[in-house]
Image: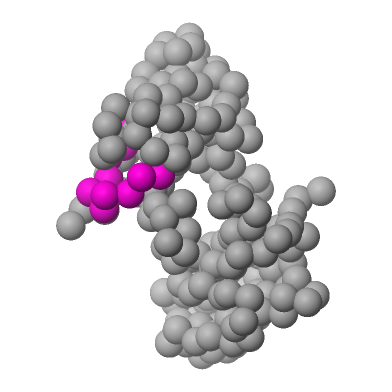
Amino acid sequence: KNQVEQSPQSLIILEGKNCTLQCNYTVSPFSNLRWYKQDTGRGPVSLTIMTFSENTKSNGRYTATLDADTKQSSLHITASQLSDSASYICVVKYGNNRLAFGKGNQVVVIP
Amino acid sequence: NAGVTQTPKFQVLKTGQSMTLQCAQDMNHNSMYWYRQDPGMGLRLIYYSASEGTTDKGEVPNGYNVSRLNKREFSLRLESAAPSQTSVYFCASGGLENTGELFFGEGSRLTVL
């Protein structure tokens, strides 16, 4: 069983609409959780980092949440734009500097 | 400031041929990584180097070798390519520094016929 599960696997949304991506993890002890954005044909780029004490953090139209008790994180995209079409990857740092990757949420924004 | 640079960006090989993917970073990171990305599988760790002079196997090391040439450079070698190694390969650095942000290269798309 994958240690980091992301849902939905893929979704299509209309430009201007909002969407929420989910990341559930089982690894411990927890250090931090990052959301990366990967544009087609490019390498992933970090969007935001969540540490144990943080519940919510915003980066422009992206808002990440973390519930360390239930081991869940979400990434909310507000007023989506065509440039938000990408894969969003959840990566959890845990233990002795170990990293666990989710398989990504594929988002397609259509006009 | 180039960040992480990978070469080549595209390569087509025949089964049994060998090749080396090159990676260099200019961020003075100790740690460097090689991942492969396949549809539906996400990023999987092949090998990593925690510091100059050390390398360790990741999740999927079979069929690959690596060399940490110096602090900047980390290469990945396929000695006898197989069709199962058709993938997109990403080099990254920085996972063991500070908060563990990974800085990725642009990827190398390899096709083995």
Kindly tell me whether residue A99 is visible in this rendering: yes
Q: Residue at position x 77%, y 60% from top?
A: A26
* Residue A9 quadrant: bottom right
Q: Is residue B28 magenta?
A: yes
Q: Tell me: B94 left or right of A87.
A: left
Kindly tell me whether residue B91 is visible in this rendering: no
Q: Position of residue A27 (x, y in %)?
A: 73, 57
Q: Residue at position x 72%, y 80% from top?
A: A67
Q: Position of residue B104 (x, y in %)?
A: 39, 51
What is the tally of numbered marks visible in this picture?
0
* Residue B50 quadrant: top left
Compared with residue B19, is residue A49 higher up or lower down, i.e. above or below?
Answer: below
Magenta region, residue range: B22-31
Q: Position of residue B86 (x, y in %)?
A: 52, 29
Q: How is the image coloured?
A: one colour
Compared with residue A71, is residue B98 higher up or lower down, i.e. above or below?
Answer: above
* Residue A29 quadrant: bottom right
